Structure formats: structure tokens, C-alpha cells
Amino acid sequence: MSTEPICQACGMQYAVARDDCPVCEDERQYVPQSGQQWTNLETLRASGTYTPRIEEQGPGLVGVGSNPGFAIGQRALLVRARSGNFLWDCAAYLDDALVQQVRDLGGITGIAISHPHYYTTMVEWAHAFDVPIYLHEGDQQWIGRPDPAVKLWSGTTLDVADDLRLINLGVHFTGGTVLHWPDGEEGRGALLSGDIVQVIGDRSHVAFMYSYPNYIPERPHIVRRAAELLAGYRFEAIYGAWWDAIVRTDGSAVVQRSAERYLAQVIDER
């Protein structure tokens, strides 16, 4: 039975019961007006409210989540890479049916997560598939349920396979990470960005924010560094954290012009 407490607002699973949720109390998230409330996977499964959701999002990319979404509501992406299936980001809800559907697609070889808002039930996923979780050490303090499956990495890049590279941009969180898949989009490249590089309604641009719900912009030097890092990568599409949040064409140029537009609005770089 999986009874470790889960914050109903952000979906973070903790090792032991507690009254507070550090993720929600941080200025990048929020404690709901109704107060902090808790649940666990067993309760969610028994409620009958949630069912698995598996849908293709692009060439070789399968969205993985639940209907309805739980907590923040993001979906994960199953990357069907040449090196093997890899799970990018993490959806909070998990049950036996969802595990089986992912296994029917070939299972997964590992998990990487963009930032702490999507850590959620990552340990449950790692245990279900007996795989490691790659997290940047810059966000170690936010891990709610420590586990040997968690593998911390440092620096700017980590190749989790010969065709998949994690890039630490530092946007949104110190460890804010994106995944570059050069073989994606039939060889034109794909960037899986969570909301480190946020896909917005105007698909001709993306956004960079320190806090999305509280409307705090990212620091200019962080945005500039992120753009400089991504200038060295080619990608046609950008896949955000939500169902169908996708920039389908000209992704590399979209990032660069978005950073330029953002920085042009900055009056004071203090």
C-alpha cells in the first residue's frame, strides 16, 4: 500500500506525515486559501476519480498522465528514443493500469524531472519500473521523499543516454533543467522543457518566469545565460508541461527571439 502523504495542491509526496508543504510555502507556488490538505495514492486510487491518460503528443513522444489531472496537473512525456524509452517529468497519479500501459509501450529506462514542482510521486514511478531518477543537485533541498533511486548530478549537462542530454538552465529553480533529443521530430530535434522554458498561448514565443502563479519574472542574467546555452542546440519543436503545449516549428529561433524580447523590456538589472 502506498500511504505516504501527498500534498493535494502541488502533488509532492513526502516520506512522513507533516503539517506544512515547503514547496507550496515557497514564493514560486502557494498555499491554497482553503489551507494545506493531504491525501495519498491509495486514497486517490480508491476514489475512482482518476483514470490513466496516454496520448501521442508528437513523433516518438507519448503523453502520460491522468484524467482529470491531479494537483498541478502536468503530464509526463515518454520519449521513444533509439537508446530506449525515457520518462521526462512526472505525473502525480499512478496506478496499476497506468503502469501496465507504459509497460505495453516498452517500459522505461530512466526518469529525469525538470524542477521540484513535478517531483510528485517520482519514487513510486522509479520503484514500479526499477529505474533511476536524475535530478540536478541544485534542487536537492526540495526532495520530499529521499530514495536510493534518486541520482543527483551537477554541472551544466548530463547525457543520460547517447541520444538524450539534460541541460541545466537554472530558470525557475537553480536546478531547472530541459531535455534535448536531437533525433526528435524525425531528426530535426526536440526540446522537452517542462515550464523551465514555458510554452505559452502565442506559439511564436516562449516565456521565462521565476514564479508563474505569483507572476514574478525571471532574473535577466538567468534568461541571458539560458539563451546562450540553448543557442548551441538545434531543435524544431518545444514540448511544454501541459497536454498539447507544443511549439511545432522553428523552436530554436523561438527561444532566441523570446529571450531578446524579454531582455529588451528590462529597465533595471539589479
Image: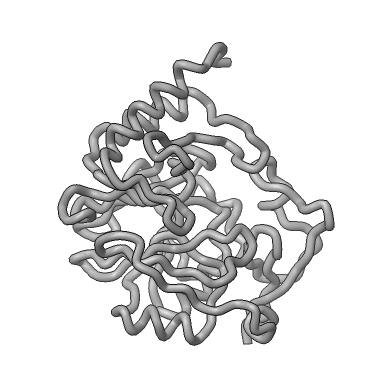
Q: Residue at x 42, y 47 (%)?
A: 177
Query: x and y percent of residue 184 in the render?
Result: 23, 55
- Marker count (numbered): 0
Task: Please identify the quadrant where the C terminus is shown.
Answer: top right
Residue 248 in the image, given as x and y percentages of width and height: 31, 47
Residue farthest front in this picture: 202
Q: In this view, does 114 lie to the left or right of 160?
A: right
Left or right, 29 with reference to 89: right
Determine the residue positioned at 57% across, 64% down.
Answer: 120
Residue 104 position, x and y percent, is 33, 84
Q: Residue furthest right?
A: 34
Q: Position of residue 32 (x, y in %)?
A: 77, 53
Q: Which is more toward the observer, 118 or 174?
A: 118
From this view, report whether residue 191 is shown above or below residue 93: above
Q: Nearer the viewer, residue 245 or 74?
A: 245
User: Please, is residue 110 above or below residue 156 in the view?
Assistant: below
Q: In which quarter of the image is residue 224?
A: top left
Snapshot colouring: one colour
Quadrant of the snapshot with the N terminus: bottom right
Where is residue 105, by image quadrant? bottom left
Name the side, left or right, on which 241 lies relative to 255.
right
Residue furthest to the left: 187
Residue 243, relative to residue 108: is it above or below? above
Residue drawn 48% across and 55% down? 242
Task: Please tell me in which quadrant of the rendered image residue 159 appears.
Answer: bottom left
